[in-house]
Image (cartoon, grey):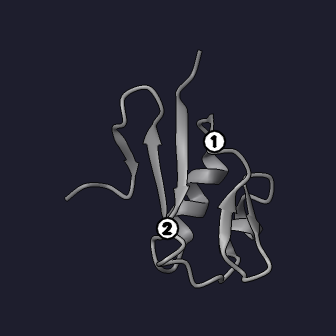
Amino acid sequence: MGDRWRVEVDRSVCIGSGMCVITAPGAFTLDAARQSHPTAPEDDADEQVLEAAEGCPVEAITLTLADSGEVVFPPED
């Protein structure tokens, strides 16, 4: 069984660029205020979701391992 990620979007940081929806359309949606929301707060690890997090212009997307809370993205310095 593969890793499961908790997907969170900090809507106080999100600028509504829509890059996450373009990169991972099944994983993110924009609401009427153009704020991003994950379609599922926890899901199987997915390369498209990681690409969406990496491509977010304001790093509003955080990915953590669901079982341990270890940060997957953004990388800790």
Mark 1: which amino acid? Asp
In the picture, which quadrant includes the N terminus? top right
Q: Residues within 10 Å of mark 1 (few under 14, many from 20)?
A: some
The answer to whether residue 53 is above or below residue 68 is below
Residue wearing tag 1: 46
Tell me residue 50's x, y (percent). Answer: 55, 52
In the image, which disc is placed on residue 9?
Answer: none
Q: Residue at x 66, y 76 (%)?
A: 35
Q: Residue at x 53, y 61 (%)?
A: 53
Mark toward the start of the polypeptide (1 vs 2): 2
Tell me residue 66's x, y (percent). Answer: 48, 32
Q: Is residue 58 left or right of residue 42?
A: left
How far is the residue under mark 1 from the one under mark 2? 20 Å
Q: Is residue 7 left or right of residue 35?
A: left
In front: label 1 or label 2:
2
The quadrant where residue 33 appears = bottom right
In the picture, which quadrant includes the C terminus? bottom left
Q: Residue at x 66, y 69 (%)?
A: 36
Residue wearing tag 2: 10
The answer to whether residue 1 is above or below residue 24 is above
User: SS of the residue at dot 1?
Assistant: loop
